[in-house]
Image (spheres, grey):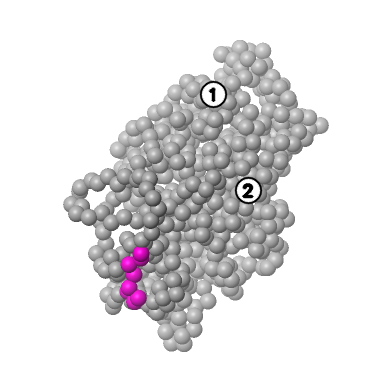
Amino acid sequence: MDEVNSHVDGSVRFAVLSAQVSNLQANQARLVNLYSAAKTTSTPNVPASPAWNMEIEAKIYSGNTVTATLVARPQDLLVQQIAQNKGRRLAGSVATEYTVVAPLRNASTNEVHPHLTARLHTRIYEGGARIRTDVVMENNWTFKASPSNITYDMTIKQNGQTVHTQPKLTHNHHARWHKVVWTGTAPQYRLRHNMPYFLDTKVAWNYNLGLNVPSSVLADEAAALAASNTKPMGSALVTTYFPMTGGRPDIGPLPRWTALYLITQDDRARASMMANADAAGGVPIHYRDENTDQPLDVQRYPNITLGYPDRSNPRVPEGSGSTEWTADRAHQPSFAYIPYLITGDAYYLDETLFWASWNLAINEAGTRGGALGLVNQEQMRGQAWAMRSLSEAAFIVPDSHPQRAFYKAMLANNINWYATRTASSTEMSPLGALGLFDEPAATIPWQNDFMGMIFARLAENNEPKARDVLNVISKFNVGRFMNDANGFCASKGAVADMLIANPNNMQYFSTWSALFAANFSSMVGRACSQVPMNEEAYPGDPQAYAAIARGTLAAAANAGVSNAAAAYTKWKGMTPALDEEFRYEPQFAIVPK
């Protein structure tokens, strides 16, 4: 057991388990049970010089002309790390893994290429008889001059044998890709988790494992993936223009493909989830600090900003060369968090950390409080997804990781900011609605719901002060559906936007009847049974406002919010068409436990 991340109380939240299963026949299933026992240690079975002998050769192109040949032969680096016990990630009698950072050198001049670097997660099994190497190619140094797209082809060899050939590709600036190769026979296995237990650990929301997802949905997912570009730098099924509005399969607490995997554990859903996690590596948001060899840290550089290079101190060189990507915080998916949880691969851990760091550094230093790393100066949905990204990093970064304290602090700083904000009688609606940062008299209910989902998971994981925030914002998120008797009809709970204060004097509406009258004046005085649901609620659309509210109410119920379970039951009864539609698009198909 390695890579332990702890809960607030010190108990284990996440660990990588390595096991050797003997005498497993083709297509045979085997249960692996976990049980408590006294702690023991095991001795890594690692030779001083494994028969690895990795060699990487990349030919750099300008147009159709090869301008340089780069090579990396990192065997000596691995031997040195084994001798000095450095760069080791996993350590046990079953598996020991070293991360070897291998610069690529010009074959003619021996000069190190300033940008292209190989990061080799090298896992040794059976005394070196089998070696698994996750070859990660990165073009993402933060401060080195003139970052740009790089076009190359590549050959990977082990012990003189070619194990992978990568045809010519253009590697985006501030991006990365990877390929797993083996020395020895690669084991053929398929690991499935006990998914009720997996979700009971509260690492993710409680998705409806009872949904009967049609096989046609999974077949369509596989067909769409097969028709997409899943090569390095390909976008797979991810929307490349993040700001595109409307319901999308990659938008939600988790994307559709991830929700499909959690619900079905089907190989087709898994393939889609993993391919889209890999596609995220091509988005030019990856900044590794060459001074620390870690993702960019705004505590170390409190005046840095990626979004406004002219205002950044120190200045970050801008990448040259176009890409198909336009990233923003308000429409970003969750890419690599669940893939890391089900694989334990360092590539997906780093990917999760890169996205969290980008969420912090993209804004101007002044708007985030410099080293505080606040994300509040953003659309509310952008705040929600940034908080999700920070929580993902904080939840899985190993306790021994050099950036553990950084990600924990960034999450805590933001929760503390929301705790102060929601406790303020002058900045917070007494009905629990979060005003917009640029228009405080108004709010967007479904984006409040996004915040509610994120803080429900934070509260379930006992993050300090998260429950205080959740209880306040749940007054609005739950109350919209439970105050028919007080003058606010639940049928109007899922709408595009609302006034929460008089814009002329910023006096907050303090009663549900006043809130209703300010937003639905033509309906005042009608019995709620005669107040229709707004068309914009889209009660049969699994990606729209009504569905978002269902997910939020379920998440709040699971976090113990008062009346949330009753509100979920009521709203579920008012939106019956979603029960069928969630079988096809389940990203909001969260249910009370």
**Label 1 belongs to which residue?**
567
Q: Position of residue 293 (x, y in %)?
A: 54, 68
Within-10-Å neighbours for mark 1: few <14, some 14–19, many 20+: many
Residue furthest right in the image: 505
Q: Nearer the viewer, residue 9 or 311?
A: 9
Q: Position of residue 417 (x, y in %)?
A: 68, 45
Magenta residue span: 43-50
Q: Nearer the viewer, residue 16 or 589?
A: 16
Is there any visible trace of residue 456 in the rendered image?
yes
Residue at the image position 50 percent from the left and 63 percent from the top: 175
Residue 592 is covered by the magenta coloring: no
Earlier sequence position, callout 1 versus callout 2: 2
For mark 1, give the secondary structure: helix
Residue furthest front in the image: 38
Residue 46 is covered by the magenta coloring: yes
Residue furthest bottom in the image: 109
> In which quadrant will I find the C terminus?
top left
Distance, label 1 to label 2, CA atoms, is: 30 Å
Within-10-Å neighbours for mark 2: few <14, some 14–19, many 20+: many
Q: Nearer the viewer, residue 463 or 185?
A: 463
Callout 1, which amino acid? Answer: Ala
**Label 2 belongs to which residue?**
412
Q: Position of residue 228 (x, y in %)?
A: 38, 53
Callout 2, which amino acid? Answer: Ala
Check the image and report above or below for 520 versus 129.
above
Is there any visible trace of residue 325 in the rendered image?
no
Question: Is residue 305 shown left or right of residue 126?
Answer: right
Considering the whole magenta stretch, tell me its main secondary structure.
loop
Residue at the image position 65 percent from the left and 32 percent from the top: 472
